[in-house]
Image (tube, coloured by chain):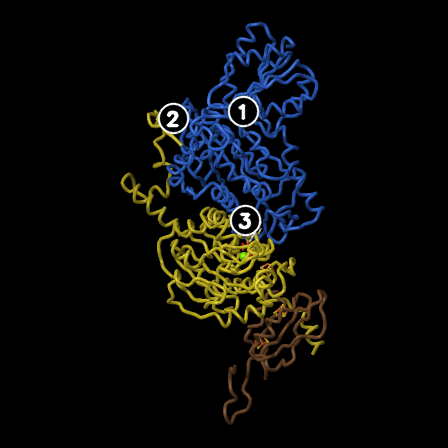
Chain colours: A yellow, B brown, C blue
Amino acid sequence: MANNTAQLQEKSHPMEDLLRMDRMPHIWCSGCGLGSAVTAFVEGLKKAGVSYDKTAIVSGIGCTGRVAGYLRLDSYHTTHGRAIPFATGLKLANRDLTVVVFSGDGDLFAIGGNHLIHAARRNVDINVICVNNFIYGMTGGQNAPTTPLGAYSSTAPFGNYEMPFNLVGLAAASGASYVARWTTMHARRLTDSIATAANKKGFCFIEIVSPCPTVFARKNKGGTGLDMLKEFQTRAIIDHDADPTTIPLNMDNEIVCGEFVNDDRPTFWENVQAGIKARLEKFANWEEMQSNSRKISHKKDRKYTSSRDSSIMRRNT
Amino acid sequence: MRFWEKPFGKEKPKTICGEIHIINDRCKGCSFCIEYCPRNVLEVSKDFNKKGYHPPIVVKPDMCTFCGLCEMICPDFAIFVIEKEDE
Amino acid sequence: MFKKSRLIGEYFMQGDIACAEGALAAGCRFFGGYPITPASEIAERMAMRLPLLRGVFIQYEDEIASIAGILGASWAGAKSMTATSGPGISLMTENIGLGMMMEAPCVVVNVQRGSPSTGLPTSWGQSDMMQARWGSHGDYGSISLVPNSPQEFFDLTITAFNFSEKYRLPVFIMADALVGHMTEKVVIPPVEELEIIDRKYTNKKPEDYLPYDYGKNLIPDFAKAGDGYRYHTTGLTHDKRGYPNMTFECQNELVPRLVNKIKNHVDDISLTEEYDIEGADVIVISYGITSRTILPAITMAKKKGIKIGYLRLKTVWPFPEEKIRKLSKKVAGFVVPEMNLGQISLEVERCAHNDSIVKLVPHPGGGIHKFEDVLHAIEEVAYGK
Ligand SMILES: Cc1ncc(C[n+]2csc(CCOP(=O)(O)OP(=O)(O)O)c2C)c(N)n1
Ligand code: SF4
Ligand code: SF4
Ligand code: SF4
Ligand SMILES: [Mg+2]
């Protein structure tokens, strides 16, 4: 048998086309859920049938932030918290792309929290996958905006005093078109969710509850990655009809999973187009403008005599 | 968990089964695959890999149903199954 | 077709508007920004013009998002720009460093106000000059252009795009509230007369392409998202594949290259304007709006019989070190009037070494230099105190 497996190693991993195998093994700890999340992402992309050449992945900083570096896609490892505005620029400047942000809870909800709620509000056509490990993994287990009340972290040695964010609730309340929560245990459902989001327009948000045995579990007597998965298994329930704003996570309550929001509302770019069109129809034929933007843009020899311009000097802050 | 039963009075039907591939040196010994395999195909090996972890070892290859769960749950891309048709 | 859809001819135009028009002429099709006096007019103009050119305008939630957004757009192949003032630049600095590290072409306009902090929102200054050079942490080469009129704001915006595309980095335009809010004649030439440079796209096949492989000029060829190259880029120290590599060797190859790709091309990047430099005893070095407000002092000095030369820096960074070094061997000294309490004068001092005197004429911003002060400094240098 041993012989048999050794020989079989020659075959290549089926995800090789989407992973940067020259960078394996990855930096994540034994029992960390991040690898499982990446597998689900890769399977989800395959299932969605999107073109890999037209898919870009953007990450911030953190253990989860390293995801971009392991995927064989156009991949951008940006600064802490800024993956969403970067991805917004990428998407708007090339609207053929499928743009996915893959980052951590601290990255997306602490330092980058403002970007997240605004991108959801605008309904920019990007997907955001947030790996929630309840902690700052990369920097060694400090408090995150998701750390449950009372949980220990290296900056909460007496237990965390702060209320955590309920990520799905926040995303839904900010206007996301699609909101789901799964754990890394729910490999198949998570994969389906990622596939759904990949083909859905508008701002899609998926929270992946993931074990961090190295820092979160160690501080909170959570055991190994396997122990954490088993705990998720006992705590998780699936309820697609749950109101996402009512299902926060704490140390030992139910982890309510499911697809909570799946709406269609106009995206940022659709609204931009509609707005310009409505305004310009008064002046000219929109189709004509599309084919010849010059005509509308300006009468060639109009001069800017600037009663308006000079008044600006009087304006304040 | 049982995925199929032997239909009464018939010979063993054509079944799908998986051929398991383990990339020993990539494994970080988390045991996810071993724990979540519904057919208990895998066990912890006594051997160490290069990094000092115990990778899984296939103990009941014939039980594998190609469900793919081990591949999906492995965080280190260290195990995968490909379909094999049994007679 | 896009290139033509812009204004041509003579206009009476505000500096900020001229900047926006310059960007459009250069091919800018993505603007991300956040309102701030005295730069808001650039965003307002872009909001009006870009959609008609099928470009993208987005008002982000803050300046950090704005700079991150234009970097993203740059990777999608768009020429992108943001415009702000001191407080906004302070927020942007981390991601300006990311742009330097990733080598993403884009343009950052700083319409300087009186600083520090909120300072003088509606008034001007030149006190962000060092921030433009050293604002983000770490070593990197950087380019800053300083216009002194709405016309030049238009011209240098085009130049800034050209440099950013050519050398692959975020390029600063360091205007100030006076130039930004001044309304003057601006001539916009037909597109054929403008030199527009586009980034060099790789002609390699995806399998052979390395995103950070470079040739003699130290500048890697570009590949944009969605073209099948599936490359990686990161703010971490990276090798030619764009993969993080935490070794001294990699750091030692990457960071000096980021500095040298600019340093080696100073002659191309450095734009200056000089008058009566030959045989001068005293040279006045100035940049931006100061170069106009101190002109009377130069005229007076000349009348007094002082052999005075005048050097105006349109490119402040990279600093024209060689030029100043050579001049410092020939002249008695330099007078550097600037609207801060001594920034570029330090550079001049460094280059003049001990060969000649360097006299700063400081001004905290919010007004203009008294020409007597400048004249006094010129006289001091000319007559040896
Ligand atoms: C501006 C800035 N501040 C702080 C850091 C340090 N830092 C790196 S990762 C990180 C936390 C990441 O937490 P999270 O997003 O939850 O990712 P995880 O490691 O848990 O996956 C911090 C604070 C940084 N890189 N940049
Ligand atoms: S520190 Fe935690 S999140 Fe980071 S790799 Fe290790 S287990 Fe994963
Ligand atoms: S494919 Fe399924 S049955 Fe086969 S080893 Fe993996 S988990 Fe077990
Ligand atoms: S899940 Fe992967 S890493 Fe964990 S024991 Fe199995 S093969 Fe090894
Ligand atoms: Mg985290």
Pointer 3 and pointer 1 on the same chain: no
User: Which chain hosts label 1?
Assistant: C
- In the rendered structure, which amino acid carries the disc numbered 2? Met
- Could you say where residue A79 lies in the image, as x and y percent from the top left? 55, 47
Instruction: Tell me which corner region of the image, top left, top right, bottom left or bottom right, holds residue C357.
Output: top right
- In the rendered structure, which amino acid carries the disc numbered 1? Asn
- The quarter of the rendered structure image containing the N terminus of chain A is bottom right
Helix, strand or loop at mark 1: loop
Q: Within 10 Å of the Cα at label 3, are there few (<14), some (14-19), or many (20+) other Cα atoms?
A: many
Position above or below: C243 against A232? above
- Could you say where residue B2 lies in the image, as x and y percent from the top left? 52, 83
Report the residue that reaches farthest toward the bottom.
B9
Helix, strand or loop at mark 3: loop
- In the rendered structure, which amino acid carries the disc numbered 3? His
Would you name the residue on which mark 2 appears? A313
State which tag comes first along the sequence, 3 or 2. 3
Q: Which mark is residue A80?
A: 3
Helix, strand or loop at mark 2: helix
